[in-house]
Amino acid sequence: FFSSSFRVCFWKVEDHHLDNHTNAAKRPVYLSRSTTISLVSFTTITMCKEATINPSIKNAPPTRQQKIDLLNARVQTITKKAIQEAKESGEPLALEFVHAQKQMTTLTAGFPVYQLRSALVVYIYAFFSTCLIIRGALMIHPLTTAMCVLTMIVGYDFYSGILHVVFDHPSNISIPILGQPCLEFQWHHAIPFDIVQKDFVDVCGDLNVAVMILTPIYCAMLDLNNGVAMVIGGLKLWMAYFGQFSHKSAHVTYGSTWAKWLQNHGLMISTKEHKAHHKPPHDIDFCLIGVCNPIIDALRTLTTNNRIWISLFCIWSVFDLVGYVKVVDALAHFLQIS
């Protein structure tokens, strides 16, 4: 599950492109079925001019840190080209390139865009969330547990769409604390294979700070003696990790059989659907599972006002679990299975 040995999807480097890594990153052509290229090989080929692996260990796969360094080197290369193009055209430089030249601080977004995350924190979060789910499930009816799972699938997908809309808005890069994840989200459009290149533990680790902030809030607001609240609370994290896996799988042409099964049955966003989001201006298909895409798209036809979407994001981030617990408790009581 935490493997980085996915086979690469969206971007292939043909032989005559090897001398021009900028062109290689821009041309969306696919691997032929007869060609299998490992993530490590792909990374080394496309970015060999930007960062190199220590010759003494050149036959060893890149470390997690080296993969992150390669991505940040890619950021610098693309930024330099964007600056040159802006000078020639006279147009203002986009904010993701502006902030890529600044040093990241605790409050402000900047370079490095990509960071190595604590794997230990990810494993600790996952362990305690699993314990919470198991303990809560033992306190309630199996059908109630199933309702919790269904509620969280739909609820998470809706939330992922809201989050994606907010994080994709260029001006939100300037918001303190929130700006850094916005910056990385928007660089994902420039470097779509970043989520494939990183180890999955680092993809999950992108959520570490958010979990640290929200966990005390949820603990204060939820009755942790309530089995439904425990299951819903534990599933919040696991659905977030599942959403990250869904997103990563959407960038892989030939992934695992079970991932393809989930995509084919509408339980994960498909490569085709997610590819639509990566076409400029990146204004459709925001959800990471895909079930709620029609709802998010419909809401965006009503308003694209950034302040409204930020407000919705903040409210949903804090109060979503309280609402889910009330819904499941009410249904369980109605069905007399609580």
Image: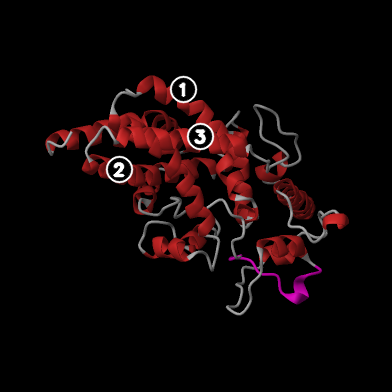
- In magenta stretch: residue 110: no
Q: CA distance from mark 1 to mark 3?
A: 13 Å
- Please, what is the three-letter code of the amino acid marked with disc 2? Thr
Is residue 86 left or right of 277 when viewed as pictured?
right
Residue 125: numbered disc? 3
- Please, what is the three-letter code of the amino acid marked with disc 3? Tyr
Helix, strand or loop at label 1? It is helix
Q: Position of residue 282 (x, y in %)?
A: 52, 54
In the rendered image, which residue does mark 2 sit on? 151
Tell me the magenta residue range: 8-19
**Which residue is outermost to the bottom?**
34
In the rendered image, which residue does mark 1 sit on? 216
Q: How many marks?
A: 3
Residue at 29% of width from left, 35% of height from top?
A: 138
Vertical order, 100 against 57 (above or below): above
Q: CA distance from mark 1 to mark 2?
A: 22 Å
Q: CA distance from mark 3 to mark 2?
A: 21 Å
